[in-house]
């Protein structure tokens, strides 16, 4: 069903009111009119229009007076002023008082419809952005969760780096440890007092794009610089001005592009592809990688000078298995997020036995793997407390089963087991059954694709 757009017309000229009202109604607008300014504010409140069209030269109170009343009353409507005075001073005064636009008499009815449509669309987009920011802020992981000594030390470094407003930061850690969460936390600390109310945070995955495309995305280009360059385009460094650009998987960036990035970090300028002039950039550059860049430098896969430039301010996130005291607060944090997201308030928490299973797990996929597991449980399980029977077998190192597990979880044989060998065996069997289709093998093992890739690499099963 098409939404009705409402317009309130206030003008003391009967001819203008009649002409505009007829034209706007024909275009599908719901229109209410008045030729007297007395009591206009109350009528506008009652009608609740999307747009109010006000004639400036009305008997007292005039259009400017009514505009002030609308602004003071904080009525959610946009105002377009109608004036026969075509001087800039009148328009500037109206815009300063909060008018969305103005029209100079005489005007064409098509011009009026274009202006109203533009004002309504602009307001709709503004409200949509506000809604999306609010929705995003409710579910984004704003804070670094954990109580381990490693996390406390990381938070201290993050706080000092953010307060210093450094230009370049390198964050390393295994896949899934939360490098982007740390990057966003730094960004939030740096720009929480931003006077504009919003500083851009732009992410680009250096491993997901071919080199030629990545270069044009980062630096932008000039019209005609290559076949598909139909117009000038700003690069991500320009779009991140006043905020942060996150270069994810920096270790995958090709050497030629690394040299161009080094020049950006040293000179704080960029040049669009096909351009002749250098443009200054004002963005914090955060790079993340799960690679050992020092080893990559030794293998000539990463530029030594770029590594030194990036690693001046260096943060490393240790894997979850080395900070097991963080599992419980992270699990509770994700449970709160997903019970709210999926409207499952009946799920209250974890039994001590379940938390022991989670804390003892190896978590090859790190925090991301734990997060995915909690989301799965919240969606699929109907219980008030999460017990060991709700946790998939691969977490405990046991075999997969479609039926429920014993309530006390996996039973360790008296003779013990070689856990690594068991994991390797299960993964090899899954790969063989899936004919080395990793996505299918991950599904058979009830684990994430990223976790399986990590395990395959860990156990050297790539070429099996």
Image (cartoon, rainbow, N blue to C red):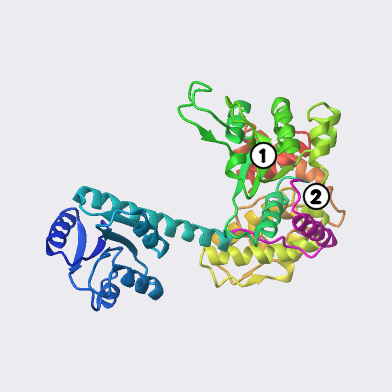
> Closer to the camera: disc 2 or disc 1?
2
Place of residue 383 in the rendered image (x, y in percent of width and height, measured from the top left): 58, 69
Name the outermost residue toward the top: 227
> Which structural element holds mark 1?
helix
Place of residue 55 in the rendered image (x, y in percent of width and height, measured from the top left): 25, 64
Residue nearest the viewer, comparing 278 with 209: 278
Residue appearing at x 71%, y 49% in the figure = 179
Q: Is residue 193 above or below residue 273?
A: below
Q: Quadrant of residue 51?
A: bottom left
- For the N terminus, the image quarter is bottom left
Badge 1 density bin: few <14, some 14–19, many ≥20, Cα 10 Å? many
User: How many discs appear?
Assistant: 2
Residue appearing at x 53%, y 28% in the figure = 222
Place of residue 118 in the rendered image (x, y in percent of width and height, measured from the top left): 33, 51
Q: Which mark is residue 430?
A: 1
Residue 119 on the magenta span: no
**Circle 2 residue:** 315
Q: Which mark is residue 11?
A: none
Place of residue 188 in the rendered image (x, y in percent of width and height, measured from the top left): 66, 58
């Amino acid at each position: 069903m098409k939404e009705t757009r409402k317009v309130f017309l206030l003008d003391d000229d009967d001819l203008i009111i009649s002409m505009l009202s007829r034209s706007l109604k024909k275009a599908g607008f719901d229109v209410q009119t008045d030729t007297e300014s007395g009591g206009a504010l109350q009528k506008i409140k009652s009608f609740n229009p999307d747009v109010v069209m006000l004639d400036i030269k009305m008997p007292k109170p005039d259009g400017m007076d009514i505009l002030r009343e609308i602004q003071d009353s904080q009525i959610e409507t946009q105002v377009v002023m109608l004036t026969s005075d075509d001087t800039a001073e009148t328009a500037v005064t109206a815009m300063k008082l909060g008018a969305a636009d103005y029209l100079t008499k005489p005007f064409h009815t098509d011009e009026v419809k274009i202006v109203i449509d533009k004002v309504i669309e602009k307001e709709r987009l503004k409200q949509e952005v506000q809604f999306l920011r609010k929705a995003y802020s409710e579910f984004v992981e704003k804070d670094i969760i954990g109580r381990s000594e490693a996390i406390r030390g990381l938070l201290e470094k993050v706080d000092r780096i953010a307060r210093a407003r450094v230009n370049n930061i390198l964050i390393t850690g295994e896949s899934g440890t939360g490098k982007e969460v740390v990057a966003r936390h730094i960004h939030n600390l740096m720009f929480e007092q931003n006077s504009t109310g919003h500083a851009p945070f732009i992410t680009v995955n250096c491993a997901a794009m071919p080199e030629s495309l990545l270069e044009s995305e980062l630096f932008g280009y000039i019209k005609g610089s290559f076949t598909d360059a139909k117009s000038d385009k700003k690069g991500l460094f320009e779009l991140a001005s006043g905020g942060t650009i996150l270069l994810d998987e920096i270790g995958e960036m090709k050497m030629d592009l690394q040299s161009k990035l080094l020049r950006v970090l040293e000179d704080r300028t960029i040049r669009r592809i096909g351009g002749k002039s250098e443009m200054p950039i004002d963005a914090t550059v955060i790079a993340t990688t799960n690679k050992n860049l020092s080893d990559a430098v030794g293998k000539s896969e990463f530029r030594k000078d770029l590594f030194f430039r990036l690693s001046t301010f260096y943060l490393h996130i240790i894997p979850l298995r080395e900070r097991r005291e963080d599992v419980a607060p992270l699990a509770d944090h994700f449970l709160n997020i997903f019970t709210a997201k999926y409207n499952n308030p009946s799920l209250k928490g974890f039994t001590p036995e379940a938390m022991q299973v989670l804390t003892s797990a190896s978590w090859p996929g790190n925090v991301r793997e734990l997060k995915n597991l909690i989301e799965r449980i919240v969606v699929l399980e109907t219980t008030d407390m999460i017990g060991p029977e709700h946790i998939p077998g691969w977490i405990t190192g046991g075999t997969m089963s479609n039926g429920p597990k014993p309530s006390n979880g996996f039973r360790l044989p008296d003779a013990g087991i070689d856990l690594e060998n068991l994991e390797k065996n299960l993964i090899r069997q899954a790969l063989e059954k899936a004919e080395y289709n990793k996505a299918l093998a991950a599904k058979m093992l009830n684990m994430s694709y990223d976790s399986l890739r990590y395990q395959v690499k860990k156990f050297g099963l790539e070429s099996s």
